[in-house]
Image (cartoon, helix red, strand yellow):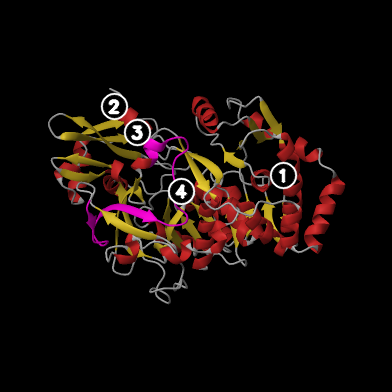
Amino acid sequence: MEETTQADIDPNVIDFGYREFQEREELKGHLGNACFRSLARHPGRVIMVDRSTGRKELSAGKILAVSLALSRKWKKTIPGKRVGIVFPPGIGGTLTNLALVLCGKIPTNLNFTMGPATIEASMKQAGIETVLTTEAVKKKLPNFPWAEDTRDLLLELASLSKAEILGLLAAVWICPSGWLVRLFNIPQKGDNEEAGLLFSSGSTGEPKGVALSHRNIIGNCRQIDATHLLPRTETILGCLPIFHSFGFNTALWLPLLSGVKVVTLPSPLEAKRIAKTIAEEKATVLFGTPTFYRPYFKRIDAAQLRSLKFVVGGAEKTPAGFGGKWEDQFGSRYLEGYGLTETSPVVSINLPGRSRVKGPYEGRVGNRTGSVGRLMPGIAARIVDPQSGQQLPVTEIGILHVKGPNVFSGYLNDPERSAKVFQDGWFVTGDLARFDEEGFLFIEGRITRFSKIGGEMVPHGTIENHIVTAFDLEESERPMVAVTGIADPAKGETLVLLSAIEISSAVLRERLKWAGLPNLWIPRIIKEVEEIPCLATGKLDLKGVERLALDR
């Protein structure tokens, strides 16, 4: 019997069935086993349409048969526990990840947008000896620090026996999946063991190895299932990189575990190509970030997106008015969600229409403008004062702490950093947040995106939003301004505005004062830069912003 937790007894904890979800038997299982059974259940169902080059359909049975053949080969020929993967979303990324999990290895999707030294350090930290990719990908990444044992997936596939694959496919169609997992020795138990490794620098520091367990990945996919957001009748357009947790979930594991079809493209930056593919494939759901969606307003004919029922925005805060503008122009719902790599990643999401999640909010409206939705089923949360560390009522602003089956257990080979992000079993998100009386979560900003000036906490993101509005920058395809703080002996910190357009101090002060901002919130220093540093996910590169602010 599980011990009583704080979520069971504390009235200031908001609990969406934490204990009940943790006790689900399937969360003790193995990711490979769960995918095997899901794919074998409907082998003829088309799970993936890869639109990287041409159009390639893959049924559940074919994905399983080819992945199983690869797994049998790699179990014998690939040394080491963790294996590097360098692929965009699509067939290559799906087959390599699934095959490695099926043979008990740990896929490590490497962020190829990072610098060579950072990638090399990540590979060393993970003990990666073998990397899987293709020659076509290698040609596009000439500066990537490839391992000595770098294998071309196309050559690996060519070495497989066609007879073996056809035999495996026939077995999948004919035999019960329970019998097959025993025959092929697919691992039964995974639970808290490492199932996948992602490297996250977030936007604030050096890359951290985020080890996600079988329980984490299966749990988060089942949490999404429990919201009824993505039934099998939907078609996802998956273009987010699989080295990022949002793409790792929605373009890779969710389709394999839940049976929803995904249409993949290699990059979220090609708005016209994405829109064309949505129209041709009649995709109903698009996942992305506000940064990636912004070009659509100027470049895309609304008729091309007619099939979309809703789009989901995550990974960064959605600017005020952005969702309404999307809905007015394109007709599909804009749903904002929230998550982190450490939470596999989804913590909360707005839902279209009425909530169908079992619990106190079932049947009530499922979305609220400005919020990131309600918590996923199985998650508990509390709010903690950033100064005193004392727990606050959930309706007050403080640091958000969460726990749930999707929350990781620690960073790779870094017990000191891991200890800092857990308090009494709760994961410390580092985000300032609050809940309203209807259970909707509002993210006020990262604690690292505040400056303490004159004893007051000043939010960088709020100031940026006001500047964007004041200078009519809403339709810019990239961030044009960023605010950060630098040390000031007199006041603790001074605000610095980085701007990719010319802005004078006098005009900035005039417009922000007219918008109602206090003097303390108006940046004292303005630095004009060629462009605002951003990560591959579209988020601000906060370390890069800080470096530019300090560069005298």
Residue wearing tag 2: 550
Is 36 rendered above or below residue 387?
A: below
Cα–Cα span, label 1 and label 3? 43 Å
Q: Is any atom of residue 275 visible in this view? A: no
Q: Which residue is mark 4?
A: 408
- Residue indicated by mark 3: 545
Residue that extends furthest to the right in the rendered view of this protein = 163
User: In the image, what residue occupies the spot 55% across and 57% down?
Assistant: 28
Badge 2 density bin: few <14, some 14–19, many ≥20, Cα 10 Å: few
Left or right placement of residue 488 versus residue 71 in this view: left
- Disc 1 to disc 2, how far (Cα)? 50 Å
| Identity, as a three-letter code, of the amino acid under mark 1 | Ser
In the displayed orientation, state which residue is furthest to the bottom.
363
The boundaries of the magenta stretch are 390-418
Amino acid at circle 2: Leu
- Please tell me in which quadrant of the rendered image residue 93 appears: top right
Q: Give the foreground label among 3 and 4.
A: 4
Q: Estimate the spatial distance between the alpha carbons at disc 3 and disc 4, rounded to whole Å.
A: 29 Å
